[in-house]
Every structure is written in structure tokens, then in C-alpha cells.
Image (spheres, grey):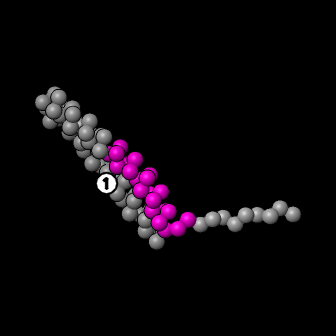
Amino acid sequence: MVKRKAKKRMTDEQEFEIMKLVLDKFLWLGFIVMGWGMFQTLSTGLLTEGIWYLIAGAILLIIFMIMIIKEYQIWK
């Protein structure tokens, strides 16, 4: 007969640390997109050249914020 190992459960602190590592990457992605938009705006001198990147980066950050809040509420 095969003996099964019991699954180890992570503590709340361990789950939070992993969530921080993953979410840090998402935040960097949003800020990189916004930074690219700022670079485009400043390098061309036209606001319209980079405004869409700035808006896209802000939308990414808002979407990730909503995902974080929903995921955190599911865990609790």
C-alpha cells in the first residue's frame, strides 16, 4: 500500500511573501509602460505621441490593483 504524504499548508506570512514577489513584477510592468510613454512624449516633444502609453500603463496598474484586492479577499 502506498503511503500518501500530507500536503503542507503555507502560513499566511509565506503566502503574503509569495504574493509580494509576484505582484512586484506586475507593478514593474505597468511602470515600464508608463515610463516608455513619458520617454516618447519627452523625446518627440508631442504629448500625443506618448499619452496612449501613459494611459495604457495606468490602466494596467488599475487592473492589477483590482486583481490584488479580489485575490486577497478570496484568501481571507
Three-letter code, disc 1? Ile
The residue closer to the viewer here, 4 or 60, is 4
**Is 13 located above or below residue 64 in the figure?**
below
Q: Secondary structure at mark 1?
A: helix
Magenta span contains residue 54: no
Horizontal relation, residue 72 to residue 51: left or right: right
Q: Residue at point 14% right, 36% down?
A: 47
Q: Residue at point 20% right, 37% down?
A: 38
In the rendering, at what x and y percent does residue 49 appear? 19, 32
Horizontal relation, residue 64 to residue 15: left or right: left
Q: Residue furthest right?
A: 1
Query: In the image, which residues are magenta?
Result: 10-30
In the rendering, at what x and y percent does residue 46 appear? 13, 32
Q: Residue furthest left?
A: 45
Magenta span contains residue 20: yes
The residue closer to the viewer here, 10 or 72, is 10
Badge 1 density bin: few <14, some 14–19, many ≥20, Cα 10 Å: few
**Is 47 located above or below residue 68 in the figure?**
above
Q: Which residue, given by chain and number where applicable, does mark 1 sit on?
A: 62
**Is 31 located above or below residue 65 in the figure?**
above
Asked whether residue 50 appears in the rendered view, the answer is no
SS assignment for the magenta stretch, majority? helix
In the rendering, at what x and y percent does residue 65 appear? 34, 57
Image quadrant in which the N terminus is located? bottom right
Horizontal relation, residue 38 to residue 2: left or right: left
